[in-house]
Amino acid sequence: MALIAATGGDDEEAAAAAGPRNVIVLIGDGMGYAQIDAASLYRDGTTFGQVTVEPGAEQVERSPAQASTVYQNFPVAASVATYPRGGGYDPQAVWDSFPAVTEGFTDSAAAATALATGERTDNGRLGTDTRGDALPNLTEHAAAQGRATGVVTSVPFSHATPAGFVVHRDDRGDYHAIAHEMIHDSDIDVVMGAGDPARDADGRPLPEPDHTYLAAEDHAALLAGETPFTLVNSRDGFRDLATATETPRRVLGLAPVAATLQYERSGPDRTADGKPVAGALPYAAPANEEVPTLPEMAEAALNVLGNASEEGLFLMVEGGAIDWAGHANDLNRLIEEQTAFDDTVAAVTQWVERESSWDETLVVVTADHETGYLNGEGADPGWRPLTGEKGGLPAVSWHSTDHTGSLVPLYARGAGAERLAAAATGSDPVRGAYLDNVDIPRTVLSLWGRD
């Protein structure tokens, strides 16, 4: 069963009563329980309490829990239901029928809106309700209280998850309008991600720019210094930001690469048409060395935001390409992306303990949805745990190339974390206590006195 425990300690309880000064939300896009375990098995040969379930069975077999990540040791753990407006989660039905979670699932836009605003919306919408009216988000609430705000991602900065915390648009695919709103019509202080029109998937200069994610005029304005942001466009620039005593007030960090920091790079684990090579191990392809890592970007964002306001900060960090690997059923690069996300949580934890404290900072780790219906070998109609050994590919099975309605994990630590535990009032026969995704921002807003 999922663990729910109070954070404990008089100091943390007192801080929670005043509300967390800093809130950092880390979202693994497409990250379910099995995605975490796949990376853990490859890195350490361990899993975290996986389950074997037969449909209709009264008992659940559970393997021993062995934490492989920093966040699996956080004192609050629960599950999260992720459905969009008009949907729902039936905790009995999803374990009685293996395919039950493959219908009615959320997309990343509706999920990001739910996690950013506390309100459900239709798939495809970013920060708007069904009438197209704007829904105030956490970054806007934080800015209204004087906090510095930012979003960081390993995929294009105009993609659904970061956009859902900044803009109000009815079409997640209108990347030019999304990027323009983020750059010119928002109060966000830090935006960091991929999507450089001038670079390919390996970070090499393109003969002609590809403006899929950022319009030519806005790219030109960034390069010319004609926006409210200081542009950072090199790995050294990100690294310098992470340690600088003085930093720009507002920064747009455009990683010098096309759509993803590492996921789409070329290499021997890819066929000529870019498909995964079966059996290839993680890191078979040399990394894009001139591209910042997700931990480096998160550290840079935290330093800029920490310097920008004495009132605290709100930061969302997304491991966006876990989802891309899930859609492709691409195991070796899923492990890479999950590991990068895990390393980012570790970097954020170190920042809290070095620059802040758990008495004044709340860290939440969760996902917007699961992607790929990843399970152990031989699953369907029963659920099987992943198995494997350190340094090898785990034995898995995929059952979708899309999102699912599976519960996803939540881990939290710091000021007010026990309030998230209290919000987990749902009961799942396998995962235990769960909350809805909208309960996460609602809890943060309550902690900030914004009921």
Image (cartoon, rainbow, N blue to C red):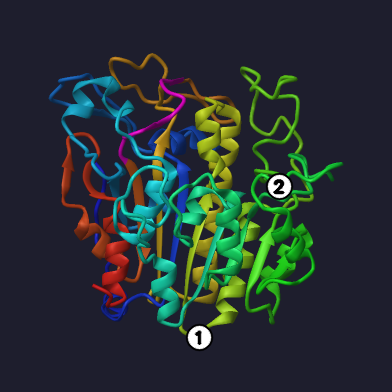
Q: Secondary structure at mark 1?
A: loop
Instruction: Give the mark count.
Output: 2
Q: Is residue 109 above or below residue 98?
A: below
Q: Are marks 2 and 1 in contact (CB under 8 Å)?
A: no
Q: Is 276 within the magenta?
A: no
Q: Position of residue 359 (x, y in %)?
A: 37, 76
For residue 55, above or below residue 266: above
- Which picture quadrant has residue 274? top right
The kind of secondary structure the magenta stretch mainly shows is loop
Specify whether 360 is left or right of 188.
left
Segment tinted magenta in the rendering: 397-407
Residue 42 visible within the image:
no
Residue 222 position by quadrant: bottom right
Residue at position x 62%, y 18% in the image: 279
The kind of secondary structure element at disc 2 is: loop
Q: Which residue is mark 1?
A: 310
Nearest to viewer (mark 2 / mark 1)? 2
Identify which residue is drawn at 42% across, 17% down: 377
Residue at x 45% of width, y 51% of height = 27
What residue did someone put label 2 on? Answer: 211
Q: Indicate whether 436 appears above or below 315.
A: above
Q: Nearer the viewer, residue 389 or 361?
A: 361
Q: Is residue 282 visible?
A: yes
Q: Position of residue 62 (x, y in %)?
A: 28, 30
